[in-house]
Image (tube, helix red, strand yellow):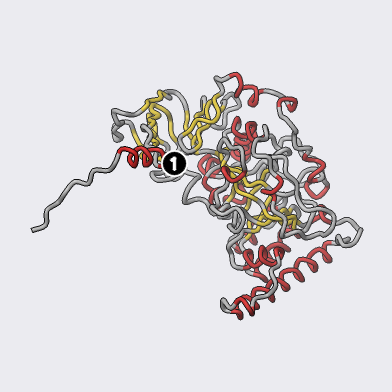
Amino acid sequence: MILKRKILLPLSILFLAAQLFPQTNPIAVKGALIYPISGEPINNGVLIVQDKKIVSVGKADEIEIPNSAEVIDASGKVILPGLIDTHSHIGEGSGGDASSPTNPEVRILDAIDPMSDSFKKALAGGITTVNVMPGSGHLMSGQTVYLKLRKAKIINEMLFCGDIQNGICGGMKMANGTNSIRNNPPFPGTRAKSVAIIRQLFIKAQEYKKKIEEAAGDESKMPKRDLEMEALVQVLNGERIVHHHTHRADDIMTVLRLADEFGFKVVLHHVTEGWKVADEIAKAGVPCSIIMIDSPGGKYEAINLAYKTGSVLEKAGIDVAYHTDDGITDSRFFIRSAAFGVRAGMSREKALEAITLAGARMLGLDDRIGSLEKGKDADFIILSGDPFSDYTKVEQTWIEGEKVFDRSNPEDKKFATGGYEVFRGDLQHADICGGLE
């Protein structure tokens, strides 16, 4: 016979466990119209979050609110998942320098100020996750970084990756078209030379990868460590996603050829003339992160920017997201980009998905963010009304169950309504990227 005995832990151990694994009371937001994105809209919905995660979401008559919950009455409001900006330049970082047209070893995370006020501007726009890019003045300007806009003093506290030194903390930024053409070697002077440089670089990476494979773990046979090649092998292995700036239809097709030749995962960014080659993009199965602005300009190759791009790509069956390219589009006006898409024929469902779940898929983070589902990160925003109304405001932004922006707080409101003078060290985006990207 086995006797079961209670194990009594010392109070000191119990206290330490409570400190290491704090249990917070749940928060229940009720009465709002909830757009889970992964399902149908929920009238008079209830969202319950606890310990940074979503516990449940559903109709009021189907969800039991725990007695211990802090209840927030959001009647008459709208709740969306936290918005995901797949292409931004906030954080006061920079990219590759003029020493080379390709800088795959450069990490934008090494140049970002996590306490930059530009992050507060993004929170005021309902953005909770960003893909921060190096600039686009290079064929390959370096490694992007995926950031959760938590309150942070050091960059580690904003990362999705667990290992800042050896982990894959973002994608790889590439570009073609006029941005990298300079007529001053080593930069290319033509589109054809641009592609030749990139192909040669990837061939070198293939050779480096082969040496690693042939070494089979034997350190004595491993090639000399090369930061450029390490990053590109991650691209070749499909571990690091290529985020590719491209505008013209012919440039878009060039990217698709490169992705097919070297087998890397790619997201097309900007895609100004994507509406011209939508069937070809769809056939390649490549997603598109597009930009939409209400005052086109900046460069000749973006002259065919069209509000209908989102609609055309949607109808072709392409996964579509929007982005700000902040400061081209102010982060505070991100939702408006999707509204432009609806005006030009995009469905409301896909337009909302384009600023949430579609972006999460393009960053490979859709298991954690992008929709309001049980077990996902408790990132959500509370809007004053319909997401696509000019009169609607972002009232609150929550990240992992913590309120990080509240428009009713005067200190927060100034970042929603103030001009550029509000922000410390604003990006000087034109100097980084040379105009509209």
Query: Which residue is more in the foreground, 370 or 147?
Result: 147
Characterize the local packing of mark 1: few (<14), some (14-19) or many (20 or more) Cα atoms within 10 angstroms.
many
What residue is at 65 percent from the left and 26 percent from the top? 415
Residue 57 appears in the picture as rendered:
no
Residue 373 in the image, given as x and y percentages of width and height = 41, 44
Using residue 94 as the reference point, say whether residue 171 is left or right of it: left
Q: Is residue 415 above or below residue 130?
A: above
What is the quadrant of the N terminus in the image? bottom left
Locate residue 284, reporting x and y percent.
61, 63
Residue 54 can be seen in this image:
yes
Q: Amino acid at mark 1?
A: Leu
Q: Residue at x 51, y 36 (%)?
A: 399
State left or right for residue 183 relative to residue 401: right
Residue lying at the far left of the rendered structure: 1
Between residue 60 and residue 141, name the one nearer to us. Answer: 141
Observer-nearest of 35 and 74: 74
Above or below 271: residue 215: below
Q: Residue at x 50, y 42 (%)?
A: 349
User: Which quadrant of the structure image shows residue 414?
Assistant: top right
Helix, strand or loop for disc 1 = loop
Looking at the image, which is closer to me, 197 or 305?
197
Residue on which disc 1 sits: 372
Q: Position of residue 35 (x, y in %)?
A: 45, 37
State the image coordinates of residue 161 (x, y, percent, origin top left).
55, 52
